Amino acid sequence: MKDLLRISLPITLWLISFSAIYGLHGLVCSARWAALGNGLAPAAALAVAALVALVLQGIAVVLVYLSPAGSVRMRFVSRALAIVALVALVWTVLPVAFTTSCI
Amino acid sequence: MNALRRHRALTRIWASEGGWKGWFTTVSHTDLGRMFMLVSAFYFVLGGILAMLIRAQLATPHSAFMGPEVYNQVFTMHGTFMMFLFAIPMFEGMAVYLLPKLLGTRDLAFPRLTAYGFWCYVFGGAMLVFALLAGIAPDKGWVMYPPLSSTLGSPGINSDFWLIGITFVEISAIAAAVEITVTILRYRAPGMKLTEMPIFAWYALIAALMILTGFPPLILGSILLELERAFGLPFFQVTAGGDALLWQHLFWLFGHPEVYIIFLPAAGAISTVLPVMARTTLLGYGWVVAAAVALGVLSFGLWVHHMFTTGIPHMGLAFFSAASTLVAVPTAVQIFAWIGTLWKGRPQLKLPMLWLLGFFATFVMGGLTGVMVAIVPFDQQVHDTYFIVAHLHYVLIGGFVFPILAAIYYWVPHVTGRRTFFKLGQVAFALVFVGFHGTFLIQHLAGLLGMRRRIDTYPDGAGWEAMNLLSSVSSFLLAIGFALVIVDLTINALVAGRGRRNPWGAGTLEWAMPTPAAAYNFASLPRVGGPDPLAADPDIALRIARGEGYLGDPSRNRRETLVLDVTTAEPRHIVVYPGNTALPIRMALVTGVFFLAMLVKAYWIVPLAAVGVIGCALYWAWSLGSKRAEGPLPVGHGLSLPTSAEVVDPPGWWGSVFLLLADGTFFGSLLFGYAFLWTIAPNWPPSSYMTPGWVGPALAVLSLVLVPLGLLLRGRALGVGLAAAGLLALFLSALTLLIALPDPSAHAYDATLWVLGGYVMLHAGLALAMALFVLCRMRAGFVSVPGESAVLRLWASYAVATGAVALTVAWLPGWVG
């Protein structure tokens, strides 16, 4: 089971981060954000969330590389998926930097 | 004992009952897999006939063939049959039939559950067929968007058939997914590690996990929409705090993974069949596994690309456009792995290979148009036009039907035991290929020229007439081609001569048995060391038949197989299966009464049927285990193992883990729905938030103390009793929610809290019933109590954890506000 968790956790972390950032986007662009008394601009909030997600994903890559061996094939699959998850996160949160937040 | 005597003894133990009774009492995965595939083929034919009606209607402008009311039912049921009653069950059927044979075991993890799932599929599908024949079929598109599908837009019973019938059928999918997952993880031939199992098993595992996490959002959406239709709970009505977009999110959270759930098993079939056709091994097994996992998980991040025209902000559009383009990469990795396999092999142009070549051409074209529609400005032009119809048929027929036909032609010698005899099949392939592209290629252009989806007719002079006529004529070619496939397979099954075992020279274990397969699969369970055991050891079939593997001695006279450690693949215990029984079909019938009562609004029957289902489930569980500890039993090769009744992690525990994964996804979707409405829906907040009072929170705190305390006292009746008391407190705490909000139809807030409260009550009640069951088992002296207590711990912990979260989010606005 540890092997299965090792291969699936980094890409699952991508899904969680991606969904959380999308959810945050919905929140910061709603009337609720100001009503919550939050002075932080939507773009800033999203940028912080994206950076946190990138750091966590990077940590996941490091942990996978450092974790004790399964078989050679499992090691390959888990490392490949960890890299894929990091690349996926960078690609899919790029819009935070390049698009308008709430229009 | 020689091979023949062993075969006869095992056949006596494992065979289904003879005659017509056997159909209803069989729990054999071989029988049920075939039954699943035959019924799903029936639905393919039914869906195909509906497609022919659509094309007949659209062949000419202003056609009088069908009026709009009938046309709406026809195209809705075409999509519904194909997606829910053909594609998923065909995968289930293939997996149910093949997996134990590929993995080197004797049956799936829960044979009676396979049968129950099959009969739920049959009865649920029958409801929808009845609706179609009676002219009251769902008619709001297979996507069923409210408000069109809610009370105002769809006042009749049509939409209820969809919501209730499809939810009934989905029980079958969830049951199969739990089985497939547990079987692949724990029921393999000794020595078959996860990295050495047949590639099809990896794909099936990923698809099963996707079913467990992808179907619950739709089940939730269906329940919410039915509650709105039946009782006025306004989840999707803007005026009362709901939002129609909530349905779209829930539907597509299911809907996008659904198409990858459909594609991945077909990709698994390609990865299995293609190397055999090329007389080599798969290139890049590790890359393919990584790509399949990536595809499975990435597909959950694409759903909003079905909603690009709903007015969401640019950043949201961009997120999902980026994710949608990204998903082409793991798909391409698999395509290149297959091309590389062909490159390094020596391909033969046999009939399965023809279908695979058809897949390459068609699916790649569909994938390219997929990347096109992932680009937002392009999609905003072609959304809801025939461009999308063309795209979806290219990827679904190209990506599922063609590979599945390759798989059927590949494995039909195994199912029938007859010689390959496929002359008509080549003509059929040619007709299907030409007919398909003739039908759908031109529809890309029709869409770009403005032809919208789901229209029952179109005007003269729109410029679409010739395209539609060509499409309709070609569709008849396509239909004739598919009909010839059925004729070809039927003739082969009936008249072809006996074939030799393993006609393709494949290396996987399913070919290491007589064909058609014996009821027991393997006379003894082999120890294997790689993904192609037959290639590594050509005599393995003989050694299996001679009883040289594990469990080769049938003298205990019962159905046995081995359960392994997940990682090391070493045997851990013996599973003793129940025999033939009518309990699954009876339980499916009672479940059907439950759903039917809701459909016809005879709500007084619903609790009675629910009690009936619970009664069947208790009887089901009670029949397992034993009061006599057998201790370790010999399994061969000097090894002795306990039975699963005497271990703390029996297969049922694993089944519960994965069922709770689905349940947890359902709960997460419910929380998402609450958060979505609170954030996005107009007409929030409600006039007032409920104040929790002190009774509800006090009961909840009591449950948070009693349940963990009780579970800590493992194996003692006092512990189970404390946990039961805590679960009762949790049930009552959630009840206070419903009492405090007497009118759930007043606002979506009230409605949501009712559903949250109902969810907690259901799970507290279920866990309480399990606790009482365990107490009774303790009194009766069953040795399986430790394993059953482990299952109880799972469900009780889940009930308390989700209860705490649900009650907190329900009470928080009242406390804070």
Image (tube, helix red, strand yellow):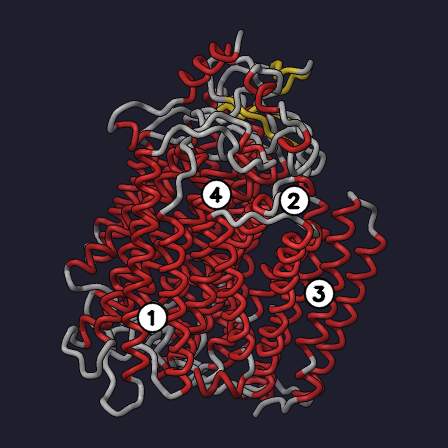
Whether pointer 2 and pointer 4 mark residues with C-beta atoms closer than 8 Å, the reply is no
Q: Amino acid at mark 1?
A: Met
Identify which residue is drawn at 31% across, 75% down: B470
Q: Are marks 3 and 2 in contact (CB under 8 Å)?
A: no
Label annotation for residue A85: 3
Q: Which residue is mark 2?
A: B280
B395 left or right, relative to A33? left
Q: Residues within 10 Å of mark 2 (few under 14, many from 20)?
A: some
Neighbourhood count class around disc 4 (C-alpha, 10 Å): few under 14, some 14–19, many 20 upward: many
| Quadrant (top left/top right/bottom left/bottom right) for the N terminus of chain A | top right
Image spot of residue A78 (x, y percent)? 74, 54
**Residue B628 drawn at (x, y percent):** 52, 15
Q: CA distance from mark 2 to mark 4?
A: 16 Å
Quick one: SS at disc 3? helix
Residue plotted at (27% across, 42% down): B590
Mark 1 and mark 2 on one chain: yes
User: Sequence-wise, which precedes: disc 2 or disc 4?
Assistant: 2
Q: Are marks 4 and 3 in contact (CB under 8 Å)?
A: no
Q: CA distance from mark 3 to mark 2?
A: 31 Å
Among the 4 quarters of the image, the one containing residue B759? bottom left
| Residue B510 horizontal side relative to residue B616, left or right | right
Disc with the residue nearer the chain's start (1 vs 4): 1
Kindly identify which numbered label has been placed on residue B410. 4
Q: Are marks 1 and 3 on the same chain?
A: no
> Which chain does tag 4 point to?
B
Give me the C-alpha separation between circle 1 and circle 2.
46 Å
Corner quadrant of residue B468: bottom left
Estimate the spatial distance between the alpha carbons at disc 1 and disc 3, rounded to whole Å. 34 Å
Marks 4 and 3 on same chain: no
